Image (cartoon, rainbow, N blue to C red):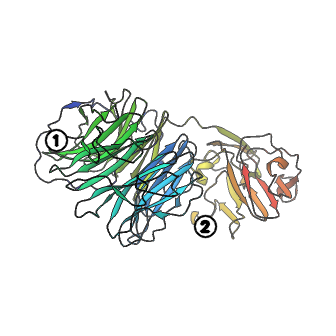
Amino acid sequence: MWGKIRITTATIILSLFLMLAVLSPICQSSNVMEEPTGTPDGWTDDIRITNFSNNDVKAAISVDENDVYLVWERTVVVSSDYEIYFTKSNNSGESWDDSKQISNSGIYAANPDVDGNNSHLHVVWSDWKTPDWEIFYRNSTDGGESWNSEKRISVDDGFNSEAPEIFVNKSNLHTIWIDNRDGSDSEIYYRRSLDGGTTFENGQGVDEDRRITFSPAAITATTIGGDGSNISVIWSDMRDGDWEIYWMISKDNGVTWQDGLGTINVGRKISDDLTSSGPVAIAVNGSQIHIIWVDMEFPGPLYRLYYRNSTDNGVTWNPIQLLVDSGTSYNPSIDAFGKEVHVVWDDWRDNGSTKEIYYKNSTDSGATWGPETRLTAVDDNSSAGPKIALSGSKKHITWIDQRDSNSEIYYKRFPDFPPEPTYNITLNEGWNLISSPLIQRDESLDVVLENISGKWDYILAYNSTDPDHWKSNDISKPGPLNDLTEIDHTIGFWINITEPGGCNLTLSGIIPTNTQIPLKAGWNLVGYPTLNNSVTVGEAFFGTGATRVEVCNTSQAYNQMEVMSTYIMRPGEGYWVKVPADSIWVVDW
């Protein structure tokens, strides 16, 4: 489905004996690689999403028009606390909210997945807070600003329920996971909600988990995708003596499951060889079903990517294509929209030990494919586990990267962001009270003030929400003694310019659309995060109860003066604002 990727996070148990040649009809796709120099044309630079001392791993992504949502597993405390975290972008990846913890395991929460639409988000994960692994769920109805209480949706029966996946169609939620309650071999279990996550049932109106696969051997690498009431499930299955890819579909919103030909509770074999197949990923777009998987082949072993599709909801399947023949490809992800099919994977072809992210696409529903493009630069640190999600012409990719000495979440997209607007602020020699009207991609003080480096010596900011209100940066002091190291678009700050005659500060960034600034009772020093220069003080602070507003005026005592309600607010100025009680100032013009 457009906007939602489906890819496994489970570990594949691979056969150790020699495999025979591939038996199925194979069509080899184009394998000419397009070598990038730096960032590939049209793509953004790599954007670091997380910045945490321990590891962030196992990311999942979902998009809904301009909203991009990420969840992942974070090592909060090594060996004792692993939790699920969330962040979002409301402007197609240009800027990101602070991450927030959404699980409350206290022990081990793992393998999250996310999907949603119209600001309704749904997250599932495995949690070890019970005596065994169980599936937990949490949702948000306001785009992740707040979250309802988490709930366990699998039966706590003493057996492990792991690696959940979720597909959302409006208020219909479909969740699958791997479960070992039926003995030594694992099976796929299913639950759905028809009321946006308030209640869950087995697809037939009963409040219980439902087994939908009946394999005589082990199952792993499950993943789910759909379009409307047609929901596809794909997995790796050991019933044939080696791992093979199997698929099944529900054409009635999860009531019954079949092989695409009407046989109930039976899966269809998609791969057809004597090698080990998996991990696997799926994308569903209307009646088109696109599947990509890894085959481990000998001698080697070699890891190749294979692709197969159906254009009639799984009634018939086109021949298997050898999509990537590097022998070093793993962890594929796929998404589709219209006739476009897009694939990413990690690959260690470049130096034989560390992985990089690769990409290729088809513009004719998988009939032919373009060249392979490496998206990350070759270094001594792996970039792995990519996920892709589409929103119209935009392709959003996230992955796990070790370039920062630990595992962090990274992101990039196509097309590149449009050129950022700039804004010039005239600074007089001496003290100035200013702010940034633009969102800075990098809020480090040295980066924000880069073009006036060496032309100032002292900066002061006032944080009314911090007991230690005043923050400063004095160039004569060693770095660790300065507690003002970042400047964002919400704060006003004093800056002393030493350049004779003054200078111009040029800022570039993203135009804010809705900024909320907490105001504490008393004085607050705030920015003016907008380029709108037609709003009066009275209009701007209406609803906050503001009783006094002051701006910079170096001819007055303390370099500032009171302004009246008719004063026109100016982008780039900083403002002292006095309010009688705590409130939130919303700048949305």
Q: Position of residue 280 (x, y in %)?
A: 30, 46
**In which quadrant of the rendered view does residue 41 lie?**
top left
Amino acid carrying label 2: it is Leu
Q: Nearer the viewer, residue 58 or 157?
A: 157
Mark 1 lies on residue: 273
Q: Where is residue 321 in the image (x, y as percent from the top left)?
A: 25, 33
Q: Residue furthest front?
A: 205
Q: Which of 275 and 210 is in front in this view?
A: 210
Q: How many marks?
A: 2
Q: Where is residue 500 in the image (x, y as percent from the top left)?
A: 74, 47
- Which residue is pictured at 89% across the width and 50% down the height? 564
**In which quadrant of the rendered view does residue 523 lie?**
bottom right
Locate residue 265 relative to residue 389 in the image: left or right. Answer: left
Disc 2 or disc 1, which is closer to the eye? 1
Amino acid carrying label 1: it is Asp
Quarter containing the N terminus: top left
Q: Which of 171 and 391 is in front in this view?
A: 171
**In which quadrant of the rendered view does residue 270 lie?**
top left
Which tag, 2 or 1, sits closer to the chain's start? 1
Locate residue 512 relative to residue 12 in the image: left or right. Answer: right
Mark 2 lies on residue: 481
